[in-house]
Amino acid sequence: MALSRRTLLGLAAGVPVSAALAGCGSSGPGDSDGGATYWYLNGQPQEGVRAGAVDAFNKAHPKEQIKDTTFQNDAYKTKIKTAIGAGKAPTIIWGWGGGTLRTYAKAGQVEDLTPWFDEHPEVKKRLLQSSFAAATVDGKIYAMPGETVQPIILYYNKKVFEQVGVKPPKSWDDIMALVPRFNAKGIAPFALGGQSRWTNMMWLEFLFDRIGGPEVFQAVIEGEKNAWSHPDSIAALTKVQDLVKADGFIKGFSSITADSNADQALLYTGRAAMMLHGAWSYGIQQERGGNFVPSGGLGYMTFPPVEGGKGDPSDTVGNPAQYLSISSKASAEQKKVAQDFFATGVLQDEEVKKWINNGSVPIRLGTEKLLAASENAGFLKFTYDIATKAKVFGQSWDQALSPTAAETLLDNIVKLFQLSVTPKEFARNLNAVTGA
């Protein structure tokens, strides 16, 4: 049986980039054995599903092999950009679409897949059509949407709420009122893996939407001059700092990483009452939290409205899908393997079942009966309804923006949460990299 050749790279910060890339084996256009290469994120339970799809493809295509290498989330974001810039990208590039994909497409580093999709209309027809927006640059498709839809969700520990004698928040004012109640009991109001930066960003994404509506961030995307200085933007930035000043987050949040899942452990062990995180967190808590999820201890809701805000409470943010591109530097043979994987290896029946068993909603159409029959049916319906009923599904900001603007954004978000910049200083710093 032909199985994938899999390499694990946790990639500690001290590993030089050149050494890390060398450890990936033959991953660039000079690959001598003709096999395709594929990098993606590790961490269970998601890694097991991704690896299973590769293994199944390799078994079914003994003459078309894929060698996969896995990375931790934060390490991957750095390594993939470095590899692509150096002309050493894997054949299949896993990503989130949006601004980063646009940068790759404009630089000619990824293949235009539009002709391939035209030749394989059945592939496109079986996926949620909304997933193609973040895969499209100037009307052309540069990535294969895959995996699952991942809105950001407000999770809470039901047992902790019962212990303190409070109810889940229905508004921003409720959130602020809950903070002292939990702190008085020695329970952190919110878990947060702040060292990872993008976890902090989720708070701003929702506050911008709930206060000003999607138009506020859209102005940033369109390069409108001084877009970050909009009064609603300043109000959202101020509310984040209000929450920090009120000790709304676990002490030491700036040293906690999301890759370690320590933030999620704080929730299911009862050390924190709430956590804002992606839909993928459900599967992690289910796997690692012992009896927490099966016993009904996990509660979930969408982010509540802000009093007087312009945003629609049905709007959400997150990842409409995950995306697979093909390196333009790959050989013709490698590109053919990747295309065959897209056609016959992505979101096949077994993969779809595994995602659903992990508490995730695949982007393949026609899964409603499988979702309803799952032991995770309640959460899956909740996620499916968010994804399908949201009037606006905003893409994660660090993926919607260009890589340069995203890096400035993430650095300034850290400073905002550490109270080392004011909201106006934050806006000025961001206007400098995203304004017209």
Image: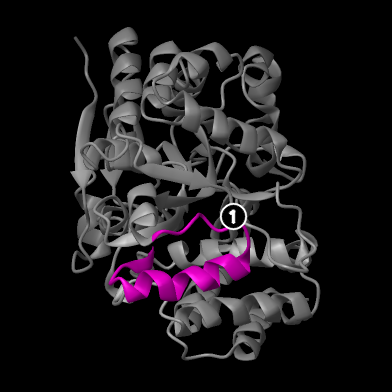
Question: In the image, what residue occupies the spot 80% across and 62% down?
Answer: 215
Residue toward you, 434 or 139: 434
Where does the image place residue 407, in percent across and percent down from the top left? 50, 71
User: Disc 1 designates what residue?
Assistant: 303
Residue 311 appears in the picture as rendered = yes
Magenta residues (range): 165-191
Q: Is residue 94 above or below residue 36?
A: below
Residue 131 falls in image quadrant: top right
| Amino acid type assigned to the residue bearing label 1 in the image | Phe
Residue toward you, 320 or 432: 320
Where does the image place residue 42, in percent across and percent down from the top left? 29, 42
Is 38 left, or right, of 7 in this rendering?
Answer: right
Is 250 left, or right, of 141 in this rendering?
Answer: left
Question: In the image, what residue occupies the spot 38% across and 48% down?
Answer: 158
Is 309 left, or right, of 335 in this rendering?
Answer: right
| Residue 155 located within the stretch drawn in magenta | no
Which residue in the rendered view is the most extreme toward the front?
165
Q: Residues within 10 Å of mark 1 (few under 14, many from 20)?
A: many
Question: In the image, what residue occupies the spot 78% across and 69% down?
Answer: 308
